[in-house]
Amino acid sequence: MNFATFAAGCFWGVEDRFRQVKGVIATAAGYTGGHFPNPCYLDVCARITGHAEAVRVEYDPNLVTYEQLLEVFWDCHDPTQLNRQGPDRGEQYRSAIFYHSPEQEKAARASKLKLQMSGKYDRDIVTEIKPAGEFWVAAEEHQQYFEKKRRREEGKSDIICR
């Protein structure tokens, strides 16, 4: 199995999107790219950690390629928005790819350039491409948030989501 890490705004929707991809074995919502050890949600929201809300994706490269995961990443947010997605604002909502190997870095940079040159966007793509560092898993209430919320709305779970 391989890992990929992406930041594209609020991690709830990003994680949900990757969980729909055949070949994705597991996901985790969490924080990376900052300087503060073991941050919690409130630390990150206070903008004192430098971390981005991110999703770590474990995938089977025999079933889904890293390039296919990059397509999902580009498609699930607006990579031209600096430190925000929709109504969410702050550096924790930045667009970033955290690569785990030189091959991932090369693929990420090539896909960013290809998208920028495609003319799809009128503005520059601001997505950061950085080496993956420490990944801090968010609290359980943030994991698979939309799945839990759907089950709760269907009356199939008593999970309380904040």
Image (cartoon, rainbow, N blue to C red):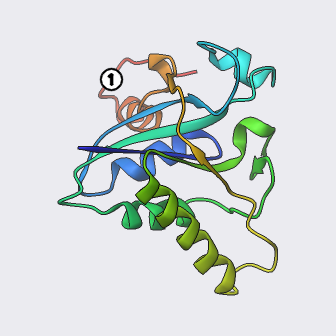
Q: Which residue occupies 32% across, 57% down? A: 21
Q: Which residue occupies 72% across, 16% down? A: 43
Q: Quadrant of residue 74?
A: bottom right
For this view, does 114 lie left or right of residue 141? right
Whole-percent x, y for residue 62 in the image: 17, 59
Q: Which residue is tagged 1?
A: 157
User: Eyeballing the image, is 66 above or below 156?
Assistant: below
For this view, does 44 lie left or right of residue 131? right
User: Eyeballing the image, is 156 above or below 96?
Assistant: above
User: Eyeballing the image, is 75 above or below 54?
Assistant: below
Q: Is residue 160 visible?
A: no
The count of marks equals 1
Foreground residue among 18 and 57: 57
For this view, does 39 lie left or right of residue 1? right
Q: Which residue occupies 39% across, 30% down? A: 148
Q: Which residue occupies 75% across, 60% down? A: 126
Q: Quadrant of residue 123?
A: bottom right
Whole-percent x, y for residue 104 in the image: 44, 57
Foreground residue among 103 and 6: 103
Whole-percent x, y for residue 31 in the image: 58, 28
- Which of the image's four quarters has the C terminus? top right
Foreground residue among 131 and 19: 131
Toward the front, the furthest residue is: 102
Q: Quadrant of residue 56?
A: top left
Packing grade of label 1 (10 A; few <14, some 14-19, many >=20) is few
